[in-house]
Image: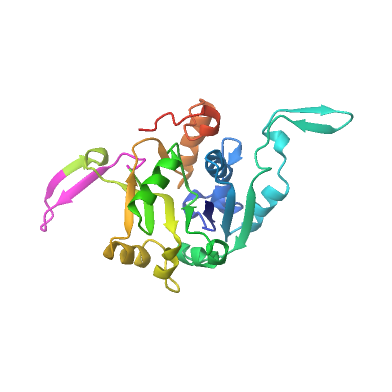
Amino acid sequence: MKVVLFCGGLGLRMHPETETLPKPMVPVGEKPLLWHLMKYYSYFGHKDFILCLGFKGEEIKKFFLNYDECLSNDFVLSQGGKRQLFRSDIDDWRITFVETGLNAEIGQRLKAIRKYVENDEMFLANYSDGLSDLSLPKIIDFSIKKGKIGCLLSVKPFYAFHVVSTSPDGYVRDIRQSAKTGMRINGGYFVFRNQIFDYIKEGEDLVNEPFERLISQRELVAYEYDGFWASLDTYKDKQRLDELVLKNNAYWQIWKNGSQTSNR
């Protein structure tokens, strides 16, 4: 399946990192978040990518146009400069770069690339702001079996916080940790059928009106996953993910681990 990656947001909560870079290009360890996501999808055999560009899209283009695989792979240097790679990262990737607007909502970015997936019955999509060790075939199989137009990844919040319930007059009825409430959030990993475009009108985002229409027609399902998932929304998120890389606990790097270490 083709993989649509939304790469055009401003990433305002990631300042100062996003003053000069789009959020998907913020480094996690030594590589951009976007690279980690693309490695994840390619591990499962999905190597045809469509990048929905916006803010600082030229930086994403520059990264791939100037990509040097020797910086991330073992190689032999001989005969005064001849390089022989032992393995390659991206030589079998196909990447379509599409300018989808500086301030466009995600729904409009998706509509902008419709012509690149209009002949595909199904395609994958991702917010490009979260990492997981999810077994991708499982959510795809789940979506196919359900036969619905949209499927999203449902995860528990990355952060622990307290959920407060109050009465109309302001008295606290209950306060509990989020982990004990059963609360789940949209993890930003999607499987779509091509009919999704029929549910997105001009100027709309993806989750609000289009998803409401899908819900009303029972055409949206959620795949619940309790393994590793983490978002990259703030600089503190970046520090946590960098620390996992430093400690060799980058669970999402299944192309290194060879299996889904926390996949349940």
Residue 264 in the image: state x and y as whole percent: 35, 33
Residue 82 in the image: state x and y as whole percent: 84, 33
Q: Is residue 101 visible?
A: no
Q: Quadrant of residue 181?
A: top left
Q: For this rendering, which residue is in front, 101 or 122?
A: 122
Q: Is residue 56 visible?
A: yes
Residue 186 in the image: state x and y as whole percent: 36, 50
Q: Residue at x 72, y 40 (%)?
A: 68
Q: In this picture, which residue range is highlighted in magenta?
A: 156-174
Q: Is residue 127 above or below residue 132?
A: below
Q: Residue at x 48, y 53 (%)?
A: 125
**Left or right of 19, for residue 72:** right
Q: Quadrant of residue 206?
A: bottom left
**Left or right of 253, for residue 201:** left
Q: Quadrant of residue 236?
A: top left
**Left or right of 36, for residue 208:** left
Q: For this rendering, which residue is in front, 217 or 190?
A: 217
Q: Is residue 244 magenta?
A: no
Q: In the current view of this chain or complex, which residue is farthest to the right? A: 80
Q: Is residue 122 above or below residue 238?
A: below
Residue 161 in the image: state x and y as whole percent: 29, 41
